[in-house]
Image (spheres, helix red, strand yellow):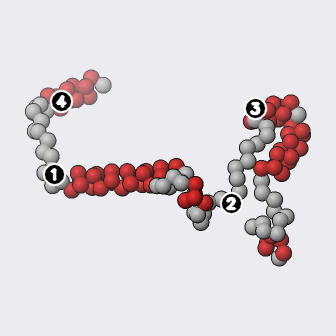
Amino acid sequence: MNRNDEQLEALLHEFEPRKPQPLTLPASDGKGQRRLAAAAVVILAGGASLWLATRGGGPTGSPAAENTSPWAPETTLVIPKMPLFVLTRVAENDPQKLDTVLDEESRVLLPGFQRKDSTLAPLAKE
């Protein structure tokens, strides 16, 4: 083992430390900055359009403009009768009662599929 240590020490003494050379950076032609600026513009435009779309009435903000939208929902928002914490308590105390409560709530919240103008009415005929 001693001989191996001596050989290793002799090998290590052969190395001479040198000062490292400075790193060279490639010359910047400005393409990266232009790409970054273009990406920022795209992100800002997308964020602005998303913000305007979720705001409700679009650029005018008038209720008439809301109703003319072809993809606007025809139904109104129904607020559930029972708060979430009440449903949680029912689930903890009596899980079977939770099923009946959720069935009753779904009849109020979800659209009826038995109507003639229902979306699923054509499928029920087949």
Residue 45 in percent (x, y) is at 38, 54
Residue at 12 percent of width and 36 percent of height: 20
Measured from the top left, where is residue 30 in percent x and y? 18, 53
Give the residue number, with chain letter if any, for mark 4.
12
Residue at horizontal 81 percent and vertical 62 percent from the top = 113
Residue contact between numbered discs 4 and 2, judged by CB atoms under 8 Å: no
* View extreme (bottom): residue: 126
Q: From mark 1 to mark 2, how far is it between C-alphas? A: 55 Å
Image location of residue 93, percent across then percent down: 86, 30
The image's mark for residue 87 is none
Foreground tag (4 vs 2): 2
The amino acid at mark 1 is Ser
> Is 65 situated above or below 9?
below
Which of label 3 and label 4 is nearer to you?
3
Label 2 sits on a secondary structure element that is loop
In the image, residue 124 above or below residue 1: below
Residue type at mark 4 is: Leu
Mark 4 → mark 2, Cα distance in angstroms: 82 Å
Disc 1 and disc 2 in contact, CB within 8 angstroms: no
Image point 57% across, 58% down: which residue? Answer: 64
Q: Earlier in the sequence, mark 1 or mark 4?
A: 4
Q: Nearer the viewer, residue 76 or 38?
A: 76
* Residue located beneath label 1 in the image: 28
Q: Residue furthest top?
A: 2
If you read the primary sequence from the N terminus, does the residue marked by circle 2 or circle 3 appear first? 2
Residue located beneath label 3 in the image: 85
The residue singled out by tag 2 in the image is 74
Q: Amino acid at mark 3?
A: Phe
